[in-house]
Image: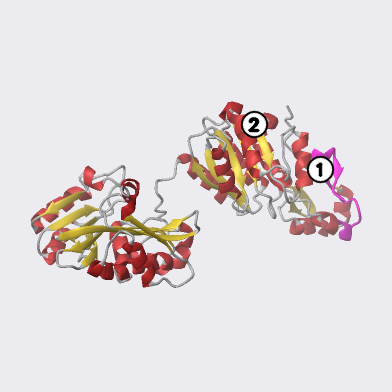
Amino acid sequence: MRFFEYEAREIVKRAGIPVTDFGFTTDAAEARAIAERIGGPTVIKSQVLTGGRMKAGGVKFADTPAEAEAYAADILELEINGHMPRGVLVDPKADVKQEYYAGVVWDGTAKKPVILFSDMGGIDIEEVAEQHPDHVGRVHISNLLPISDYQAKECIAQTGVTGKALQRLTPIVRRLAQLFVDNDMVLAEINPLCEMNDGTFVALDAHMDMESEARGRHKGLLEELGVGDDETRLAREPTEFELAGEAVDSADHRGVAGNVTEFDGNIGLVIGAGGGSLTLFDAVRAHGGEPANYCEIGGNPSVHKTCGLAKLVLTKPGVDKIAVMMSIVSNTRVDIVARGVIKACLELGFDPAEKIAIFRIPGAWEEEGFKILEKYGIEYADRSVSMHEAARRAVAKIAGPEAVTS
Amino acid sequence: MRTDGTFIGIEVDDEALAAEPRLAGHLSQVCPVDIYREAGDGKLEIVARNVDECVLCRLCLDIAQLDVGEDTVRVIKLYDGGATLE
């Protein structure tokens, strides 16, 4: 769940990291008042959840309050990448000596957060990491143990920063890491983190992304920032296909058959169970397959709900066959899922044996499930076939043996 | 290609229903997926939409056996050659 820049800056400020005397408004006249309060040149920045603001004309520099008002009026009407701004941020024009980068992201491979620091701020950290790897410091931290200054210092020092700058940057980076852990963020980034000409440091821009599942733990913060319960704040708007998946899932309280994400491949997936969705999705890709969708099925959804999800995937343009695959299930019944996906095929006028490329769900009630699958001539696999092998078979059957890359 | 998309069959003995007016109510109470609906005056309606949701829990068989006796309700696994749930 992403935050607007003005919200991210507020989060940074609450963590004890110095920020400029900025103001947020949805009104051009108020932008003028903020500029008057700041006194001096200002920067007017569109508040949108998309990149490319500068290029699109969503960031403008004003020398006077009157200019600030005029620019704010323009920016408030300016659509950027299909997004209308939430408002504008009015910021003092900074007297910058050097720009740094400080960020904390979740490292999925190491399964812990990693602090990133660079003495080359103001540009994409990915670009810096690629072209100037010696200018990026990295230190992993624990999500459970206290975060110490020395970890932040070690990270900063990797880039060659020493002396007073190192001393001043250390608490800022440590607080950013603490903020990341305390607020269940998946990304907490200050870019640029600026050293001003007077030697002080301030966060000039910030990006925050909170784990959506953690929203319930941070109701107070979200309420104070004015983030409504209905605001999903996803990286992009859900597609019609994804909304249809949400409708299938919400129509029946039993189990899960949804969390659909649309992709442009041709392999329809009905997948799930205890992390099985991610594993199977990755396995399909690892074998050269191009999934048409991601989804999650588990917790014992009804036959009707399973049928609804399978129908949705089967009718997605470009999908010819589906692969029904799960990890070894405990509470989700094999026979119930089998009934649902077969019903989906039949209700659409398809032969289940043709449309279901593979059915690999071992576990609860598998004997009953396998009887059903046998009756309809569907290829199925028990637990002796790994998820990766099932994914390979699905790719070979749907995309053709030549498509299998490993 | 098989086109039959029904997996479960339900049969309830009409004479048993007439003899035991509480049976319809009890069946509708115990079924976790609402296959049975009490239609008043001891009559019973089978909700066709929910029949394939049957989770083979045997609760209907058990309550019918308590109220009337064995074989009052039969749950048939149509995918298994018409085998009945025991």
Q: Give the numbered dot on residue A348.
A: none
| Secondary structure state at the residue bearing disc 1 | strand
Three-letter amino acid code at the position of disc 2? Lys
Residue sitting nearer the eye, B31 or A342: A342
Tell me which residue sits at (70%, 31%) in the image. Answer: A353
Q: Residue at x 48, y 35 (%)?
A: A264
Query: x%, y% of residue A108?
Result: 49, 54
In percent of width and height, residue A393 lies at 65, 34
Judging from the image, mark 2 belongs to the subunit labelled: A
Instruction: Write down the region rendered in magenta.
Output: B64-86
Mark 2 neighbour density, 10 Å: few (under 14) some (14–19) many (20 or more): many
- Give the quarter of the image for residue A253: bottom right
Q: Quadrant of the C terminus of chain A?
A: top right
Q: Position of residue A124 (x, y in %)?
A: 30, 49
- Mark 1 to mark 2: distance in Å? 24 Å
Specify the amino acid type for callout 1. Lys
Q: Is residue A347 above or below residue A57?
A: above
Question: Image check: A238 left or right of A345?
Answer: left
Q: Residue at x 60, y 30 (%)?
A: A398
The stretch drawn in magenta includes residue B82: yes
Of residue A277 and residue A312, the one placed in the foreground of this image is: A277
Residue at numbered disc 2: A355
Left-right relation of A171 to B45: left
Residue A124 in view here: yes
Q: Can you say whether A312 is above or below A399 in the image?
A: below
Instruction: Classify 10 Å Cα crowding around label 1: few (below 14), some (14-19), many (20 and above).
Output: many
The percent coordinates of residue A62 (x first, y second) are 11, 54
Which residue position is annotated with label 1?
Answer: B77
Left/right placement of residue A50 relative to residue A44 reads right
Regarding residue A191, the answer to whether it shows in the image is no
